[in-house]
Amino acid sequence: MDIIEKIDIILTEGMMKKVIRGGKVVRKLICPQGFKAKGKKCVRMKGDEMRKRKKSAIIAQKKLQGKTDKKEKMMRKRAKSMKKRGIKIPDVFPTGNSDPMKF
């Protein structure tokens, strides 16, 4: 096995990460950019699929920006998930300031 094959294996190798799904901690395969999880391996995505995913992500973001109640619900769920993980993210401040030091 030469060095190029070793580098290719390292780049395509995903890592297992703990995520929260449905209120429970689950292990999930996280793949590098341009790859997707298929079974227990990371597989390279085709250009067509990558383009569709990119376009749908842009559309989803535009829809989210218009709906504040949906965005607030998502932020609450994210905060709850982060609390379970033991991470604190200062996304929403009590006074609405963008500076975390000014309350």
Image (cartoon, grey):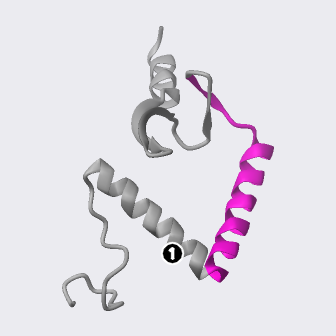
Tell me the quadrant of the picture where the C terminus can be found. Answer: bottom left
The residue beneath circle 1 is 72
Q: Is residue 66 magenta?
A: yes
Residue 62: x %, y % from top left? 68, 75
Kind of residue indicated by mark 1: Glu
Label 1 environment density (alpha carbons within 10 Å; few <14, some 14–19, many ≥20): few
Residue at the outermost top position: 1
Q: For numbered disc 1, what is the local secondary structure? A: helix
> Magenta span: helix, strand or loop, mainly?
helix
> Would residue 62 appear left or right of 41 to someone viewing this image?
right
Residue nearest the viewer, comparing 18 with 57:
18
Q: Residue at x 48, y 8 (%)?
A: 1
Residue 26: x %, y % from top left? 44, 34
Residue nearest the viewer, comparing 66 with 49:
66
Magenta range: 41-67
Residue 68: x %, y % from top left? 58, 81
Residue nearest the viewer, comparing 85 with 60:
85
Q: Residue at x 55, y 73 (%)?
A: 71
> Would residue 65 appear left or right of 28 to someone viewing this image?
right
Placement of 16 over or under 57, stated as above or below: above
Residue at the outermost right position: 48
Residue at the outermost front position: 23
Q: Which residue is drawn at 51% across and 25% down?
A: 8
Residue nearest the viewer, comparing 21 with 47:
21
Quadrant of residue 38 within the rendered picture? top right
Q: Which residue is drawn at 73% across and 68% down?
A: 59
Image mark count: 1
Quadrant of residue 6 within the rendered picture? top left
Placement of 94 over or under 5, stated as above or below: below
Placement of 78 over or under 85, stated as above or below: below
Residue 88: x %, y % from top left? 27, 62
